[in-house]
């Protein structure tokens, strides 16, 4: 039985072309700036984001941390969404390692931070207060149904930030999903930010790596921070080689993941015992709730036994993510297996009440 793994797009594996490129990659010592494959990937990333320079990092978490350490000093404050990956899922790295204080603003259902709330969160000049340094956005917004944030929104935040002399960092782990979903080139989003990070190891299917992109002096400073957090790698061109193939061949196909996610959402929404709004699904992430009285963890466990892996994401909430390893037929099979598993639930409940 094939396992249908919808836990995350991070479960993607390198394509045959990536493996071939990795095997044949030209490498050197990247801490000395001498890995030609990494240098090429960094140039490509800079070109795609329209930024002067880029830095290869081991992960998205490391890329975001390095960006924040580079923008902020200890005691500075970062305005960030209360559902942001950087706030929830990065082990408090900004506070623990950077002495940076996160100031949360509620994420709206579409992943944005209301402009008024942002404005209110910016500190004035007062000897008692930390200095607001940075606004951190996330596009697509993972916890908000993978919503892509619009270009207009980024521009509005950029204007606000500039009026208050603040920097902007975009956690663009899935910015290529946003670009494909909205038909907007990545560099347009990046133009409204001082730095942007993106991941190669999610929908783009490379095995490892993220890029942080920004101005030349910013990236030079970020390179020192990367060394400090132990992220200076040596012959890592074997990893960058896969990243180059990812950028060359895996971006356009994200549209298939989005179509599959929508199909999955529409199928799941028909199943009694599931609550879901398919119209909210704009990229490759589907959230839904189980309404039968069982917990998300219990349902996830039973689904796993049936051959569908879906992550629990709250008491009754689950998250399914489509990616290169999921075909349209897998989506239909997953919907059928979820329906069957939930039929068993209602059968058990009926028997229990007899
Ligand atoms: N997200 C992972 C988990 O950590 C939740 C996932 O399965 O979605 N920014 C965003 C928006 C992310 O979704 C993630 C990973 C990261 C950053 C961190 O990337 P990595 O895992 O490479 O450190």
Image: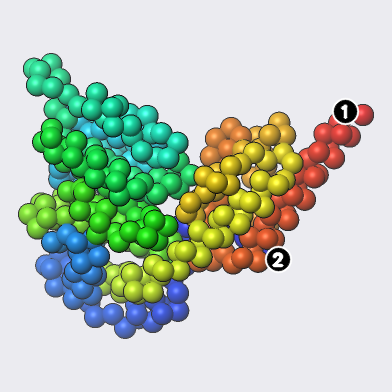
| Residue toward you, 129 or 144 | 144
The percent position of residue 261, horizontal first and vertical second, equals 55, 56
Residue wearing tag 1: 353
The percent position of residue 270, horizontal first and vertical second, equals 71, 47
Dot 2 beta carbon under 8 Å from ligand 1: no
The percent position of residue 295, horizontal first and vertical second, equals 65, 34
Judged left or right of residue 326, residue 200 is left
Q: Could you tell me which residue is drawn at 63 percent across and 51 percent down?
A: 266
Q: Which mark is residue 1?
A: 2
**As displayed, is residue 257 above or below residue 318?**
below
Quadrant showing the C terminus: top right
Q: Could you tell me which residue is drawn at 81 percent across and 38 percent down?
A: 346
| Residue toward you, 281 or 86 | 281
Q: Could you tell me which residue is drawn at 21 percent across and 73 percent down?
A: 40
**Residue 334 position by quadrant:** bottom right
Q: Secondary structure at mark 2?
A: loop
The percent position of residue 139, horizontal first and vertical second, equals 35, 48
Local crowd size for mark 2, using a 10 Å CA cut-off: few (<14), some (14–19), many (≥20) = few
Local crowd size for mark 1, using a 10 Å CA cut-off: few (<14), some (14–19), many (≥20) = few
Q: Which mark is residue 78?
A: none
Is residue 90 visible in the rendered image? The answer is no
Labels 1 and 2 touching (C-beta < 8 A):
no
**As displayed, is residue 127 above or below residue 99?**
above
Is residue 78 visible in the rendered image? The answer is yes
Estimate the spatial distance between the alpha carbons at disc 1 and disc 2, rounded to whole Å: 34 Å
**Residue 216 position by quadrant:** bottom left
Quadrant showing the N terminus: bottom right
């Amino acid at each position: 039985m094939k396992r249908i793994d919808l836990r995350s797009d991070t479960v993607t594996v390198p394509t045959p072309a990536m493996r071939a490129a990795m095997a044949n990659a030209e490498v050197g010592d990247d801490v000395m700036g001498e890995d030609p494959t990494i240098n090429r990937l960094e140039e490509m990333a800079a070109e795609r984001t329209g930024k002067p320079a880029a830095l290869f990092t081991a992960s998205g978490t490391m890329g975001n941390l390095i960006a924040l350490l580079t923008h902020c000093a200890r005691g500075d404050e970062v305005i960030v969404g209360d559902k942001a990956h950087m706030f929830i899922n990065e082990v408090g790295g900004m506070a623990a390692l950077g002495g940076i204080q996160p100031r949360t603003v509620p994420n709206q259902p579409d992943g944005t931070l209301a402009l008024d709330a942002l404005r209110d969160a910016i500190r004035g000049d007062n000897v008692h207060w930390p200095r607001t340094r940075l606004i951190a956005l996330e596009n697509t917004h993972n916890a908000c149904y993978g919503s892509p944030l619009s270009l207009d929104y980024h521009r509005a935040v950029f204007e606000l930030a500039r009026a208050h002399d603040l920097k902007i960092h975009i956690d663009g782990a899935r910015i290529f999903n946003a670009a494909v979903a909205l038909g907007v080139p990545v560099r347009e989003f990046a133009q409204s930010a001082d730095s942007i990070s993106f991941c190669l190891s999610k929908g783009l299917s490379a095995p490892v790596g993220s890029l942080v992109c920004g101005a030349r002096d910013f990236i030079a400073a970020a390179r020192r921070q990367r060394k400090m957090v132990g992220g200076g790698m040596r012959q890592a061109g074997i990893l960058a080689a896969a990243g180059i193939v990812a950028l060359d061949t895996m971006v356009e196909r994200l549209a298939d993941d989005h179509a599959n996610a929508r199909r999955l959402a529409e199928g799941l929404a028909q199943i009694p015992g599931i609550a879901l709004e398919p119209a909210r699904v704009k990229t490759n992430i589907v959230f839904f709730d189980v309404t039968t009285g069982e917990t998300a963890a219990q349902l996830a466990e039973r689904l796993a036994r049936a051959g569908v892996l879906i992550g629990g994401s709250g008491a009754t909430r689950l998250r399914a993510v489509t990616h290169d390893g999921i075909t349209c037929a897998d989506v239909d099979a997953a919907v059928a297996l979820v329906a069957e598993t939930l039929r068993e639930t209602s059968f058990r409940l009926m028997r229990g009440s007899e």
